[in-house]
Image (cartoon, grey):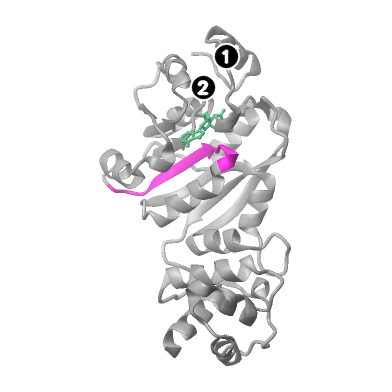
């Protein structure tokens, strides 16, 4: 089968099947062989790997993955793409295509069945409308993961990588950095896709931490604190957290904990590091 990274080959297959792009599925197909090679290199795929691809589209990146990995499982929501994938991937015996919504699949079970529970690698040019839910569900559902290498909106990639003191720092930065080490590996302009997205894109690799980088007694409690702090970004931490009803905290309890940490009573949540959120969460749980 012809390499779909070459624009003419993609156009031919789209015309042959009279394919209509579905905006609601975030369909922007890659047509740049250099970018495709960069993604495969960044994901460090070897013949030992089982790769989960989310949203194979017409199978462009799937072809590259199938050449390098031991096994590829590709999950595509759009049933109109399934007959196309049958043709474009017909040369590969190591690819399984599943027609489903990835958010409704039990990925842990797939990793168990396809890779004996060993860590898988996720590689995807993600549909941008569900980037955050996909990443969070991969981390939170306990799927055995080695790394996630994904194309996302450039701004979202930056948000995942930054630390305190920048305007992009937020709940997503902290969640991603709790689970993984983020590294932006390429910036990708709109002309590498058909149709062209309205925003710039970037490839980011998230390498799963073997051991969490901070010692936290109750992850859910820490993430509830983080969400509440960034929901009320302009407020001091003590006001923001005491306003969040689900946390049942008073201003006094928060300031007692921030005092112990050597922080000012007017500190804002957006200046705290992941280690400080972990310490704050542990202290607040001890106080009861
Ligand atoms: N991998 C292809 C490429 O790079 O050319 C296509 C990438 S396109 C940005 C995103 C793909 O994800 C589309 O094929 C779209 O139909 C699929 N998709 C969107 N939502 C999905 C979901 N919830 N589950 C699985 N696939 C989805």
How far apart, in angstroms, are the residues tagged by discs 1 and 2? 8 Å
Q: Is residue 34 above or below residue 82?
A: below
Q: Nearer the viewer, residue 71 or 225?
A: 225
At horizontal 36% and vertical 55% (from top left) the residue drawn is 142
Q: Where is residue 202? Give x, y as percent.
A: 65, 43
Q: Nearer the viewer, residue 251 or 37?
A: 251
Q: Which residues are magenta?
A: 117-129
| Secondary structure state at the residue bearing disc 2 | loop
Tell whether position 47 is magenta. no
> Would you say 262 lies left or right of 225 here?
right
> Would you say 147 lies left or right of 192 here?
left
At horizontal 68% and vertical 77% (from top left) the residue drawn is 268
Count the marks. Answer: 2
In the image, the residue with mark 2 has its CB under 8 Å from the nearest atom of ligand 1: yes
Residue 22 falls in which quadrant of the image?
top right
Q: Quadrant of the C terminus?
A: bottom left
The residue wearing badge 1 is: 14
Q: Where is residue 110? Give x, y as percent.
A: 31, 41
Q: Is residue 177 above or below residue 221?
A: above
- Of the two numbered discs 1 and 2 on the same chain, state the one appearing first in sequence: 1
In the image, the residue with mark 1 has its CB under 8 Å from the nearest atom of ligand 1: no
At horizontal 49% and vertical 40% (from top left) the residue drawn is 123
> Would you say 163 lies left or right of 254 here?
right
Q: Which mark is residue 58?
A: 2
Q: Is residue 191 above or below residue 112?
A: above
Kindly check if marks 1 and 2 are in contact, taking CB atoms under 8 A apart as contact.
Answer: yes
């Amino acid at each position: 089968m012809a390499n779909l990274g070459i624009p003419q080959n993609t156009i031919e297959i789209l015309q042959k099947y009279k394919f209509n792009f579905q905006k609601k599925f975030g369909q922007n197909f890659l047509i740049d062989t250099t970018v495709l090679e960069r993604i495969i290199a960044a994901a460090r795929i070897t013949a030992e790997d089982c790769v989960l691809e989310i949203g194979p589209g017409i199978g462009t990146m799937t072809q590259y993955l199938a050449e390098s990995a031991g096994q590829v499982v590709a999950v595509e929501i759009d049933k109109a793409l399934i007959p196309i994938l049958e043709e474009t991937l017909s040369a590969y015996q190591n690819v399984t295509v599943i027609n489903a919504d990835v958010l409704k699949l039990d990925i842990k079970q797939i990793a168990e069945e396809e890779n004996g529970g060993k860590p898988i690698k996720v590689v995807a040019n993600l549909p941008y409308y569900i980037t955050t839910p996909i990443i969070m569900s991969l981390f939170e559902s306990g799927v055995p993961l080695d790394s996630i290498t994904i194309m996302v909106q450039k701004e979202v990639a930056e948000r995942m990588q930054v630390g305190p003191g920048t305007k992009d720092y937020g709940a997503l930065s902290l969640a991603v950095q709790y689970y993984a080490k983020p590294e932006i590996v390429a910036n990708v302009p709109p002309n590498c896709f058909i149709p062209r997205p309205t925003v710039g894109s970037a490839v980011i690799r998230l390498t799963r931490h073997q051991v969490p980088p901070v010692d936290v007694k109750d992850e859910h409690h820490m993430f509830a604190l983080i969400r509440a702090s960034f929901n009320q970004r302009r407020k001091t931490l003590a006001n923001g957290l005491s306003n969040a009803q689900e946390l049942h905290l008073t201003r006094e309890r928060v300031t007692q904990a921030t005092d112990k940490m050597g922080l000012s009573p007017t500190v804002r949540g957006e200046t705290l590091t992941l280690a400080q959120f972990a310490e704050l969460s542990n202290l607040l749980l001890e106080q009861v």
